[in-house]
Amino acid sequence: MTPAEIAREALLKLAADKLPPTPEHYRRAFCEIAHQPDETNVFARELLEYIEQQPGISRLSPRLGRLRQALEGERWHDGAELSFSVMQALAEQQTAGQDWARILRELMRLWDMPLSISQSHKRETLERVLSVAGAQPLLLYGKLGNLLDNWKTSAASMRPADSLLTFDELPGVADESSGMAGSFLGSSGSGPACPDDGAGMSWRTILRGTLVNGVSPRLKGYPELAQELMNLVSLLDETVSGNDLEMLGRRLKRFWIRLELVLEQEDRLANALAGLLGVLLDNISELVGTDSRVGGQVEAMRDILSQAPLSMRKIYQLEASLKEAVYQQGLIKHSLDEATDSMRSMLDSFISRVGMLANQTDTYRERFSRYGEEVALTHDVVGLHGILGRLMQDTRAIHTDLASAHDELQGARHQVEAVNARIELLEAELVEASTKIKEDQLTGALNRRGLDEQFMREASRAERNGQPLALALIDIDNFKQLNDRYGHRTGDNALRYVVDLVSERVRPSDAVARFGGEEFVVLMPDTSQEQALELIERLQRDLTKTFFLANEDRLVITFSAGIAVWSAGESELDLIERADHAMYRAKLAGKNRVLAATDDM
């Protein structure tokens, strides 16, 4: 039957059944005659089947029965309300037993509690949990619980049992600090009581030294704050009672608030200057165009500006790198200028010689013209013989001049070619001096710009050849603890130590790059996930077989790593993010481990 015939039969059926021709009645009659399923009923049936498959639905049998009746009776408004009610009840069942208030209270308590892990490590681990499970409440609840359990373990021991950055035993200071705190607060700890004279001298000396030596030098540009600080230092000697101590505490609190506002203003000023510098770099890039002699330096500065927060160490490293590049480019530029002057001198000589040839050509043309006139006027053999002699003499002179000019031009051409080759070599050295900034100045590994270029090359090659490309993100375990205990210079030496060992052990085709701080990337072409796991685990074993010396202490440095294999079309940042999630799981699993990214990452 044609659609028109079906429509006519549907109307006749409605009339025979004495049903009003509403859209729903007409649709149902049309589908029945055409032997087609009712799409609305199909959707309702699929919705009902989906709800019936949810865990815990058996506890909601009465609501489910009412929903089934509403959908079968095509009461869509009631069906929508009942569907929402059933799904809301299911969600409440699934979240039953999740005490979010307890989780949040525990998080705030452990956040402020001094642990063996630093605040930056707390912030880093919490941000990773939120990035992995922030949109999944059930998963987030479990991960937050595991994270807080790890923090509580750290709080109980004040030194993690699984710390794999093994230090030689050093004397602790916990007893001294706890004794000082007890004497300062008083034995009862029930209110502000001024310490006794012996302890008072101790805390006054410590606080005065902190304010004068630690805070005051940073207030040179803020005379009002500096004066207020000196007033607080003077007030220390006048603090003799509990009320005086309470007043000092209130004034210190006001001072810290003002200082925090000033520091925030400095941060905004630094960010504004960084923005202006970014605009200036964009303008320089537009002006220099494709001049690669400057491009490397501009990109290196952009890399520094893109890393938040700005680090003075990174800025100083870039400054030293730029100074070295400028010095090398200055030497090369001097040689390039000399080569350019030499070429200019040869071109001047060439032009002068061509001019002389042109003048000589004019002279000989005039002579030959006169010889022609003399031949026309001479009728005796003797006269013609004399003209012929002069003509032959001038012809030999022309030949000699041309041969000499040819030799000079050939020599000039060879000199120009040599100078041109020298200029090309010097320009290549200029470009190389600029691109040297692709290396991290501290460790010698590739920096972010070098990693970006290496990844683009290897990803293109992997896509062409159909070969795997693996990436490992390595994070040194407990590096912050090492830095705090032994100083930044020892921390820098530790970074160089790790990079040197990794660079020696990886294959020539692999690339090692510093991703930031104590994080490194190993890019492994033609490497499957299993091969990458084996390679990085071998690096871990090799690293733990040697000792790193720090102030005559022997340390065993370890790292945690995550492995991810590149998928066609995947961006570099997405690949690194998957490896980062795997590395975070390795950290939570006990450190000194290597885990591969799973499909759900």
Image: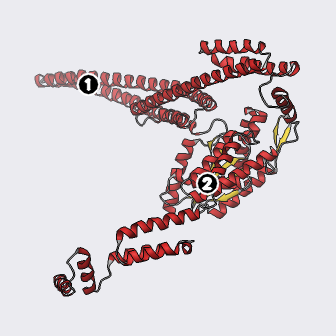
Visible residue check, residue 241: yes
Please name the residue that numbered disc 2 is placed on: 581
Where is residue 167 shown, x and y percent of the image? Answer: 83, 42
Where is residue 455 shown, x and y percent of the image? Answer: 54, 51
- Residue in view at x 87 percent, y 34 percent: 175
Residue type at mark 1 is: Thr
Whether 128 is drawn above or below 337: the answer is below
Task: Choose between 541 and 218: the one closer to the eye.
Answer: 218
Where is residue 348 shown, x and y percent of the image? Answer: 37, 22
Left or right position of 19 against 77: left
Packing grade of label 2 (10 A; few <14, some 14-19, many >=20) is many
Please name the residue that numbered disc 1 is placed on: 361
- Residue in view at x 46 percent, y 24 percent: 342
Where is residue 78 shown, x and y percent of the image? Answer: 38, 69
SS for dot 1? helix
Residue type at mark 2 is: His
- Residue in view at x 59 percent, y 41 percent: 447
Task: Choose between 483 and 149: the one closer to the eye.
Answer: 149
